[in-house]
Amino acid sequence: MSKTGCLVRVLLAMLPAACLCGQGPAPEGVGKGKRPARPDPLITFRTRHFFSAGSDFEHRQGGFSLYGGEVELSLTKRISPRGALGLSLARGLYRLDFQNETDLVPGNPEPFDLLHSTTLGFSYRHIFDRRWGAMGRFSLQLGREEGGDFGDSLDGFLMAGARYQWTDDFALSFGLVGLTRMEEHPLAFPAVMVEWNITEQLKLEMTRDLRLTCDLGGGWEVWTGLGFQGDYFRLDEDNVLPGGIVRITRVPFRLGLDWSPGGPGLRLGSYLGWSFAQELTIWDHQGRKLQQEKREGSLEAGLRLRVSF
């Protein structure tokens, strides 16, 4: 694997850690004066649907477009004045539409069917005082094509870290992350996250992605972000590559507009973007890499909805 590929994998693996920042009812302490009171328990429903337009492989005939839909239901409950537990369940469906007589797998222009992902997550946050807090998360993710083996489709994720409220407008989170990957060695690395209120209207975050948000007033926000997206899937036992693995990665740059009518409990959003550094990798059931194909840049569009109560 190239050095660039290794770096992208590390950045992709960091994404679940970001789910620990800024979610759920705020325990007493850090930043309490900056956020409105939230329900306890807090229940949140999120959904996102996106389309990545078709583009060709750089060094192979054909290409594909990508359609995806994701839903998540989470619950966060205070268990003490300074501690909160979280539980989340997410489901995703993804379809690759292969084009232009793709020869990725010779003789099979449509080598994959619908791909599924299911993630179950547990988290805990604790505030020690107005400056220091701690957080932890454990999750299991199941990524597979219909008919793929359940046991061989599971990956685990574990994160533990601390959060320091440097000033009322700047917070730094840091910790250690460990995860397993299908047919590959486990990975461990440090993670750093930043939350910075530059002004009352402008906010910079390095959590799920690198994101700059501007509050326009009236419940409207405009934002731009650079992120890392990637997923592993175990293929069907009856596939032309029985029990193999496919990995889809891309780096999207997005410009979005969100609207919260009537308060923060409901948020509607849309975005347009450009995905680059796209790659499709295939392994056989023994973990031997068969294909690693780069894909040209492509236009991406998405819709999002979040409801909290």
Image (cartoon, rainbow, N blue to C red):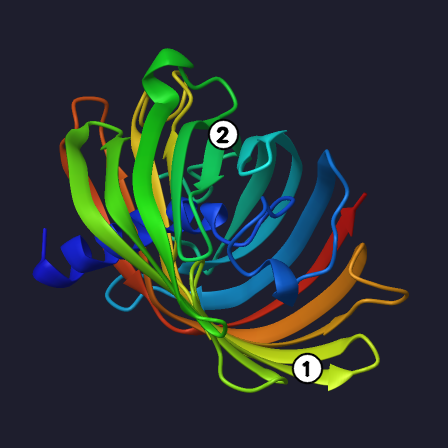
Q: Position of residue 125 (x, y in %)?
A: 47, 38
The residue identified by callout 2 is: 121
Query: Residue 235 lies in what quarter of the image?
Result: top left
Q: Is residue 122 visible?
A: yes
Identify which residue, 177 or 164, lies in the foreground.
164
For label 1, the SS is strand
In the orientation shown, which residue stands out farthest toward the right?
262
Q: With respect to residue 172, does 136 lie above or below?
A: above
**Residue type indicated by callout 2:** Gly
Within 10 Å of disc 1 (Cα), the crowding (few <14, some 14-19, many 20+) is some
In the orientation shown, which residue stands out farthest toward the front?
129
The residue identified by callout 1 is: 215
| Quadrant assignment for the C terminus | top right
- Judged left or right of residue 244, residue 113 is right
Work out how far the residue at label 2 is from the one at label 1, CA to CA, in angstroms.
30 Å
Q: Is residue 230 visible?
A: no
For label 2, the SS is strand
Picture residue at 42% right of the left edge, 29% below the top:
139
Identify which residue, 284 or 220, lies in the foreground.
220
Exactly how many numbered labels are in the figure?
2
Picture residue at 72% right of the left edge, 66% below the top:
269
| Mark found first going from the N terminus, 2 or 1 | 2
Q: Position of residue 196 (x, y in %)?
A: 45, 74
- The numbered disc on residue 97 is none
Query: Residue 109 lies in what quarter of the image?
Result: top left
Picture residue at 36% right of the left edge, 12% below the top:
151
Picture residue at 37% right of the left edge, 53% below the top:
163
Q: With respect to residue 243, does 233 lie above or below?
A: below
Within 10 Å of disc 2 (Cα), the crowding (few <14, some 14-19, many 20+) is many
Do the residues bearing badges 2 and 1 touch, measured as CB atoms within 8 Å? no
Identify which residue, 102 or 6, lies in the foreground.
6
